[in-house]
Image (tube, rainbow, N blue to C red):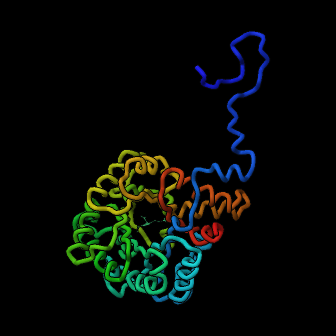
Amino acid sequence: STTPHLSSSPSAGTPLAGPILRPRRLRSSRAMRELTRETRLHPRQLVLPMFVREGAVEAVPIGSMPGVVQHGTDSFRRALTEAAEAGIGGVMLFGVPTTKDARGSGADDPDGVLNAATRIAVAEVGDALVVQTDLCLDEFTDHGHCGVLDARGAVDNDATLTRYASMAIAQAEAGSALLGLSGMMDGQVEAVRTALDDAGHTGTAVLAYSGKYASAYYGPFREAVDSSLQGDRRTYQLDPGNGREGVREAEIDVAEGADVVMVKPAGSYLDVLAAVAASSPVPVWAYQVSGEYSMIEAAAANGWIDRERAIEESLLSIRRAGADAVLTYFATEVAAWLR
Ligand code: PBG
């Protein structure tokens, strides 16, 4: 065989020649490393999640997410322009309503905070960015769950689908190009797709949060949307121990008509991301969630890690595992570095 092997020759008396295989050659200079890098970040593959607070004009800081804010109308417009100038791919909007109720009435109100914010975003940057909206009830319900509750206080899957269908119409009419279905109800993609098509919104796309895990890393997000969740989300979000289930959810969502599928959180679920990416016929995205953001910021603030290197490495790893695009609170900043 001519297969290269380590140096020691089988013939006695031959001096050691050193390793035949030297992978370090391709690491020897910055230019060589750049040329041989497999995975890169591109601004267009980054999506910025944004929070918009009803009634606010200027930004309100989020204590658990230093650098991230609940936008008011003025700061929102400025941040949209900045994001478009940085050349990111899109924005994912979340509403923070002033009043909440059991059925999340603000969610499908055409004048509700999220739908109003969507109109602003489409008018400001709709040509440059893909304006996307979170389609879920938790920001709008007083109990903080992603769906409506039945008489026993359990999340009622099928009654929630009716609410999601109504939200979908309101969001499409506000101009959202891609609806982010993050509620993890069974049948949500089909319910929303059917409602959109029946209403003539055949061009509005659906992003399914398929592999969405019941994660501690959403902690800071609760403050970001002023949520006071009663209980937890384990009856609808996936158990962190399950990999196959994430792949199965993605398959179901594709069968129901999802245009894009997602795995979330990203960093602790790279195996699920890689498995979904290996078989998905549609684009696969990942969400670097609030807790992943805050851990980097907190460690960097203490001088324990190099902030910029950690951000780049975290995003590169998510891309390397198979994400075609990444939702990240670092999107605008990273896009500016990359230019
Ligand atoms: C649900 C939703 C959540 C996040 C995005 N969409 C919260 C949850 O499921 O508990 C979390 C995002 C983040 O933590 O950055 N509307």
Answer above or below: position of 310 versus 14.
below
Residue depicted at 40% across the width and 74% down the height: 133
Residue 152 visible to an observer of this rendering = no
Name the image quarter holding the N terminus. Answer: top right
Residue 17 percent location from the top left of the image = 77, 23
Answer above or below: position of 224 versus 3.
below
- The outermost residue toward the top is 12
Q: Is 188 left, or right, of 329 in this rendering?
A: left
Looking at the picture, tell me which residue is in the foreground, 248 or 124: 124
Residue 68 percent location from the top left of the image = 57, 74
Q: Is 9 left, or right, of 90 in this rendering?
A: right
- The outermost residue toward the front is 2
Q: Is 319 left, or right, of 28 in this rendering?
A: left
Looking at the picture, tell me which residue is in the foreground, 283 or 108: 283
Residue depicted at 22% across the width and 65% down the height: 158
> In terms of image quadrants, where is residue 2?
top right
> In terms of image quadrants, where is residue 143?
bottom left
Residue 8 percent location from the top left of the image = 72, 19
Looking at the picture, tell me which residue is in the foreground, 154 or 182: 182
**Total numbered labels placed on residues in the image:** 0
> In terms of image quadrants, where is residue 112?
bottom left
